[in-house]
Image: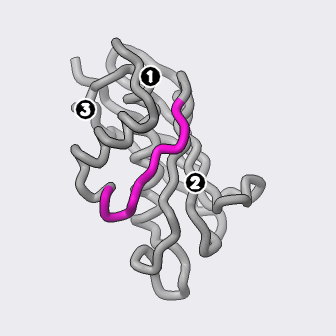
Amino acid sequence: MAELTAGQVQALIRAGVPMAEDIDLRIDRLEADLAVARVPFHGKLVRPGGTLSGPTIMSLADAAMYAVVLGRLGRVEMAVTANLNINFLARPKPLDLIAEARILRLSRRQAVCEVQLYSQGEEGELVAHVTGTYALPQ
């Protein structure tokens, strides 16, 4: 399959998942088994207390997993989330939220991924840790 660029994957996700436009999802980098995605901090994404909402954090993690799968396999838009487990570890700062997604194992039927999320410039302090599985179309 043809390799996709970060910009192509971002366009595919934004076209197929309209909510990605709402949170201004960006794919910053794409490598063989790594995708770096971000959601710019915006007041419409916060919860009471002024921190990013859980649904925003989960959405970014899921989109980052989707991005790394698309980046590795090409146009497999029908790949779907089969499992997502998230551990919220720290309160995100009022900065862009960054997600680094990696493929841990890839088979014909599924991709097992890991995502580390942190506030921009705060790589040493994880906001959340995610593991997930994408079911791949046959």
Pointer 3: what residue? 77
Q: Is residue 132 magenta?
A: no
Q: Identify the residue shown where x is 34% and y is 12%.
A: 1
Q: Are marks 3 and 2 in contact (CB under 8 Å)?
A: no
Would you place residue 114 above or below residue 58 in this image? above
Label 3 sits on a secondary structure element that is loop
Pointer 1: what residue? 72
Image location of residue 48, percent across then percent down? 48, 87
Q: Identify the residue shown where x is 32% and y is 19%.
A: 109
Work out how far the residue at label 1 is from the one at label 2, CA to CA, in angstroms: 20 Å
Work out how far the residue at label 3 is from the one at label 2, CA to CA, in angstroms: 23 Å
Image location of residue 41, percent across then percent down? 52, 69
Q: Are marks 1 and 2 in contact (CB under 8 Å)?
A: no
Q: Are marks 3 and 1 in contact (CB under 8 Å)?
A: no
Bin the neighbour count of mark 3 within 10 Å (Cα to Cα): few under 14, some 14-19, many 20 and up: some
Left or right, residue 100 beside residue 3: right
Q: Identify the residue shown where x is 29% and y is 38%.
A: 12
Image location of residue 137, percent across then percent down? 23, 23
Kind of residue sitting beneath label 1: Arg
Label 1 sits on a secondary structure element that is helix
Pick whichever of labels 3 and 1 is earlier in the sequence.
Answer: 1
Pick whichever of labels 1 and 2 is earlier in the sequence.
Answer: 1
Pointer 2: what residue? 98
Kind of residue sitting beneath label 2: Ile
